[in-house]
Image (cartoon, rainbow, N blue to C red):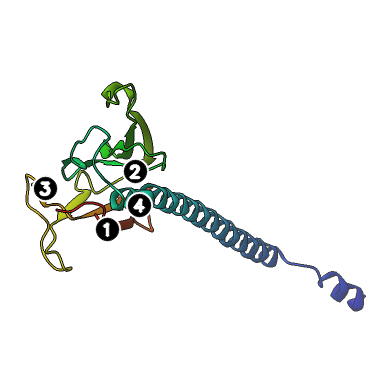
Amino acid sequence: MSKNMRHLNNGFTLAEILIAMAIFVSVALVITKFMLDLSNFSVFFGEDLMAEQELQISLRPMVREIRSMGPSNVGSYPIVAASLSSFTFYSDGDGDGLFERIRYYMEGNVFKKGILKPSGNPLSYNPSDEKTFELTHNIINGSAIFSYYDKTYTGSENPLSLPIDVPLIKMIKAELSVDQNPNTLPGPIIFSVSAMIRNFRQ
């Protein structure tokens, strides 16, 4: 009889069952939180990668275009206008022998590009023919995108003061700061480039 009683008492008690359930629930919560954190990290990483790609696509071609700028096909000066939020100039960006009027500028929190090809006979630049493209979104450094330097720049001098004296410009710097989620980590991505004008004398 006592052997049978000892055998019956070998099962789990109510307290043991409750403790086991608590441990199981705790482990499940930890795993769930880890999976959510991993998912959020993947989202942030993907958004940052997309932002970085947009920045590279936006600024790297601009360097090439600035370096090869020159007078327009109607004889206009290579640089049309320069400000902190926009830069307009002539360059043969597609290598077809025609110098397009290229405009990089901010509109809201979007960095954009406008391309105006000369047309007609004789050639002319009709502003209504400009084609615009959105390059980079979620810019957070406002309108202070461009800075300009003269031929004396060696790396430590201050940029030209406003209003910009266009004929003095020899080098252009552009910096974009992008943050896809301003209220969360990891924070903004900053991408900057500089380009020296080399195809005309100043």
Residue 75 seen in this snapshot? yes
Q: CA distance from mark 3 to mark 4?
A: 20 Å
Disc 1 marks which residue? 194
First along the sequence among labels 3 and 4: 4
Q: From this view, report whether residue 43 is shown above or below residue 130.
A: below
Disc 2 vs disc 4: Cβ atoms closer than 8 Å? no
Check disc 1 and give the amino acid type.
Ser
First along the sequence among labels 1 and 4: 4
Q: Residues within 10 Å of mark 2 (few under 14, many from 20)?
A: some
Disc 4 marks which residue? 64
Q: CA distance from mark 3 to mark 1?
A: 18 Å
The secondary structure type at the circle numbered 2 is loop
Check disc 4 and give the amino acid type.
Arg
Q: CA distance from mark 3 to mark 2?
A: 32 Å
Check disc 3 and give the amino acid type.
Pro
Image position, residue 120 (x, y; %): 33, 21
The secondary structure type at the circle numbered 1 is strand
Q: From this view, report whether residue 82 is shown above or below residue 124.
A: below
The residue at the point 48 percent across, 56 percent down is 45
The residue at the point 29 percent across, 39 percent down is 109
- Side of 27 relative to 44 (left or right): right
First along the sequence among labels 3 and 1: 3
Disc 2 marks which residue? 138
